[in-house]
Image (cartoon, coloured by chain):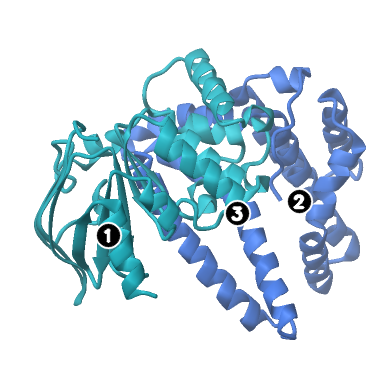
Chain colours: A blue, B cyan
Amino acid sequence: MIALYLPGTSPIHRMPAGPKVLIFMALTLAITLATRSAWALPALFALVVGGYLVAGLGMRDLLRQVVVVRWVMLVMLLAQLVFLPPLVAVANTGRVLTVIVLAALITLTTRIPDLLDATERSLAPLRRFGVNPSSIGLLLAMTITAIPVIAGFAASIREAQRARGVPLRIGTFVVPLLVMALKHSDDLADALVARGVE
Amino acid sequence: MTGHPSIAFDAVSVDFEGRMALRDVSVMLPERRIAVIGSNGSGKSTFARMLNGLVAPSAGHVRVHGLDPAREAKQLRRRVGFIFSNPDAQIVMPTVAEDVAFSLRGQGLARDEVAERVAATLGTYGLSALADAPAHTLSGGQKQLLALAAILIRQPALIVADEPTALLDAVNTRRIGNHLLDELAQQLVLVTHDMRLAARCDVVLRFEDGRMLECGDPRDVIAHYEREHA
């Protein structure tokens, strides 16, 4: 769900991570508040699409982000259709999708260490309240790194279950996935300590 | 081969809530290449994990290169590089170059210097072409090379490798084994089930049921082990 950096020399690639994250936050706020005009959300989505083009990324890169989250979006849409008018449900889902595509644009054009540095710098004032900016930066980086690992666990569990003829059920799938994820987190904690992270 | 700063265990025991993982181990190891062999659950990994303070002794004293892992863990971990058997669990950052660079964080190095050292280290391990590749898409052998690169860029004085070839094929086992045993100058503690690798070390320790049964010439220790497990 979180895209990896694609090297490039576009203005968006060259923009420092700090301002880029600030623009992301401002646009996210605008997307969230774009409820008054029917044209506001499509206009903001068009702006994000423009960002992909300026970054030298193709529509394929954009569509890949949409395809990855399609089931989550579908569940979100269906859940809202139960309680909300169809137009509102579609607009809300569209808002979330636009923010996801925008977030992917940031991670596609920014190296993770640069994002980490920007996060640490922006959180530095919170140090006086006992917040450790390095730990939060590391937490973000490891969250991004863990996604393909957990996806790999899920794939191997399903493969093993298919090989033994076990039908897909939430209980038989989630429990081993949690066990593997917890074991991985233990191993990763040891590896971090061994690499000097306290 | 001797002359390296010593690893010293003095009557060390480790009690994991009633299960004795190590029992009264005493040994002095100045050799460069030290192999640790034994059955699963024999205490090999516990012994290795004590060398950088991942496991603390319940009784006795450990000194590694003059430092006490229990009280000076931070200084010790700067001197000890630890390689685990599962390379996936050692990857912290999303891409190959970022993961190697992560090892240099907090050392106050300039960005250019970090980039230079990362590029040189990736070159040493044949990973230059994969610098921007997602680390988790690498093969098992490449991941273990990445783990080595991430450890060795910190220039540790001691390398502890806990079954580093357990998940590798024959070609990669030979490649990693040759590198660890023949191409590095650092002191090495190699936990392994591969007797061909153990035989190439200067000394072999043999563990069973938490006890260190033998410490001596690789040929003798391996012969005893194989005879008993034939």
- Which of label 1 and label 2 is nearer to you? 1
Distance from disc 3 to disc 2, alpha carbons, whole Å, reads 45 Å
**Quick one: SS at disc 1?**
helix
Please indicate, yes or no, whether residue B84 appears anywhere in the rendered image.
no
Three-letter residue code for mark 1: Val
- The answer to the question of whether label 3 and label 2 lie on touching residues, with beta carbons closer than 8 A, is no
Q: Which residue is mark 2?
A: A96
Q: Same chain for the residues at labels 1 and 2, yes or no?
A: no
Q: Which quadrant: the C terminus of chain B? A: bottom left
Q: CA distance from mark 3 to mark 1?
A: 26 Å
Q: Image height check: is A172 above or below A95?
A: below
The residue depicted at 54 percent of the width and 26 percent of the height is B124
- The reply to whether label 3 and label 1 mark residues of one chain is yes
Q: Amino acid at mark 2?
A: Val
- Pointer 1 residue: B221
Residue closer to the observer: B119 or A137: B119
Q: Earlier in the sequence, mark 3 or mark 1?
A: 3
For disc 1, the neighbor class at 10 Å (few under 14, some 14 to 19, many from 20) is many
Mark 2 crowd level (few <14, some 14–19, many ≥20, 10 Å Cα): some
Marked residue chain, label 1 = B
Residue B169's mark? 3
| x, y percent for residue A23 | 68, 28
Q: Chain of mark 3?
A: B
Task: Answer with left or right where residue B86 lies relative to residue B48.
Answer: right
x, y percent for residue A149: 61, 55
- Identify the chain of the residue marked 2, using the numbered disc in the image: A
Q: Quadrant of residue B98?
A: top right
Q: In terms of secondary structure, where does tag 3 sit?
A: loop
